[in-house]
Amino acid sequence: MDAFDVVRIIFGSIFVLFVPGFAWSYVFFNRGKIDWVERVALSFGLSIALVPLVVFWFNWVFHVNISLINTWIIVSGITIVAIIWLYARKRLWTVRLAEKLSSRTKFVRFRK
Amino acid sequence: MREKIQKISKIIDLSYLQLVIIFIVLALLEALNVISLPVDYRIFAVVIALFAIPTLIISQRREGGSFSKAMPILFAAFLFAFAVRVIPYIQHPVPLGYDPGFYKYTFDVYASALPSIPEGELASWIKEMYPQGLFVFFDAVHLTAGTDSLQFMYYLFPLIGAFLVFPVFLVTRNLFGQRAGLIAAVLYAVSFTQFDMFAWFYFKNAFGLMFLLFAIYALEKRKHGLMALMFAALGIFHRPEFLLFALILIPYFLTHRRRGIIYACLGTALMILPFWIARWDENWSTLTGVVSTAATNIQTGEALGGGTFFGFTTYTAVALAYIPFALIGLFYLILRRNWNSLFFYFVINLVIVVFELFFFKRFIIPLDIVVIILAALGIEYGLLQRGRVPKAVTALVIILLVVTAAIPTIDSVRDTKPLITEGQLEAIEWVQDVEEDAYVLALSHDAPWVLGWSEHRVIAPGLFQWDEHTKDEWFAFFAANDSQSARDFLDVYDGPIYIYYAKNADNCYLGFEKFENEYFQVVYNEEAIIYKYEGGD
């Protein structure tokens, strides 16, 4: 096994075994809701659950071949969907917070 | 009358700690083979749990220890669990257990079918034995990390086995506090049952336990989306634990009535739909098989279809140190009317194992997990939360308990050997270079190894898709001494046949006289012997 193989095993494993689950752990638990041990453990569990489910679905429904590039795209896609979800949720919260704050300001002005 | 009850209660309470110490010391002496305890001794475990009731009634939940202080213990448990799983591989490079050959062959079939999933071409025994999840996951890891089937098995299995320390810790901490979580993690790390699962190479079982624990964690955290995902993962990785979790959900839903559970189950059904539709016949026959086995076992009292693992009596011996505390934990849940998922998990799993319903020996593995968690709860509320006891005494009891539980595991780590030797594996690998269209005949003891490492079609009694003989024909072949009978048996196949036999195999029922003639040549003769039969002309 040469150095390239070792590097590929390490980074490839992290990419499949950890990254998608890590992103999705924030979908289920906001920052600060769980400690880092919980998040790391969940990240592994979620990745191992999500990757075969999504890969099989893509192969079965859309007849997507399981090649290196397609697997890479699918795993990245799982991660990106989580990031978009988090971004949308944050935006939604920001909008709701802004609405809340503006209504409170109006109320204060009205009282004055 | 009330005073009398209080007096008795006080006497019981005072006797409890002394009984615990006596029990642990005796269990330790038995683990060290200094004394031999009768089977009835296990009743002592129930007596201790009953004596703990006065303590449990008055105990209050108090959080113990900071998170940063817990980390070294948690990581020590992880490292211990990892070390005991790696040491056998340092001693013997051949994988442990009977199943590695089945796994290696199936991983190789999936890898060679890329970029497709070989669902249509898979033999029926693979479809019955192995759900797709682990193998599709292997495809993804194989493509991105470049690992082959052996690397995947060698590296990932010990890691997953040790990693389970964390889900055990998280589930226990979530329900019963950090200190109980740590105790559960340590007990998992030293558990003989969990090590034995590793030594038998129950690869998908380890994934099943991980998803089962995360599903319970999500259920108790009311994260139904996460629960649906973990439940689906159970369905595509390990069906027995999928069934167990499904059974847990029924009483849990009836007692908690959360609509989210229904939605989660619907989500799970949707996620696993393509996996199950693709194998509808196999899954249906497995399900009907489980039901009919359970019905037969109940009606006749026969213990059929238990699976390969040790029985419940052996389990009570190897887990003797923590069983009383598991009962204390169970009593605590009952006294507090805490009908959480772990309570249902314990009851359902225990019923399957004790009443020998189906696959009951293999269900000892998840049973041990819940027993460990309940034992941690029992130690927390039966010892640590108990006032009036010096900390040194409780610490000593816990250390003795962990050591007692660890002794059979450490003995097993030292003694565990692969079922075949390196020399025999070399003999199997020698077959890789023979004619492509050749078959290899092996006995059922060696067959999985030959299947995984020979890269040829394997003929074995009652195994694999290439076996074209009935049980009686196999028996006649084993018993025959004349070459003609052997040739008639082998001529069913086109192409040369290599007959593999590992010399030190127990119970050799393959007579060799029939091969000692001009039709059979010895082509390999070291730790295993290989005969070649050219085929009938």
Image (cartoon, grey):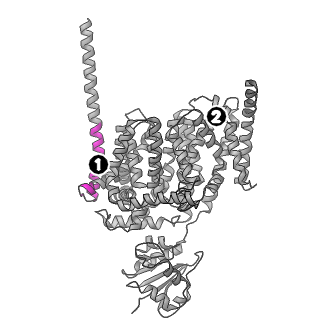
> Residue B479 shows which numbered tag?
none
**Which of the two discs, 2 and 1, sits closer to the camera?**
2
Task: Categorize mark 2 by other alpha carbons within 10 Å: few (<14), some (14-19), many (20+).
Answer: many
Left or right side of B531 for B142: left
* Camera-nearest residue between B156 and B317: B317
* Camera-nearest residue between B381 and B408: B381
- Quadrant location of the N terminus of chain B in the rendered image: top right
| Identity, as a three-letter code, of the amino acid under mark 2 | Leu
Which contiguous range is marked in magenta? A58-85
The chain letter for the residue carrying disc 2 is B
The chain letter for the residue carrying disc 1 is A
Kindly indicate whether the residue at mark 1 contacts the one at mark 2 (C-beta within 8 angstroms). no
At 56% from the left and 50% from the top, the residue drawn is B351
The residue pinned by badge 2 equals: B384
The residue pinned by badge 1 equals: A76
* Camera-nearest residue between A29 and B359: B359
At 70% from the left and 42% from the top, the residue drawn is B47
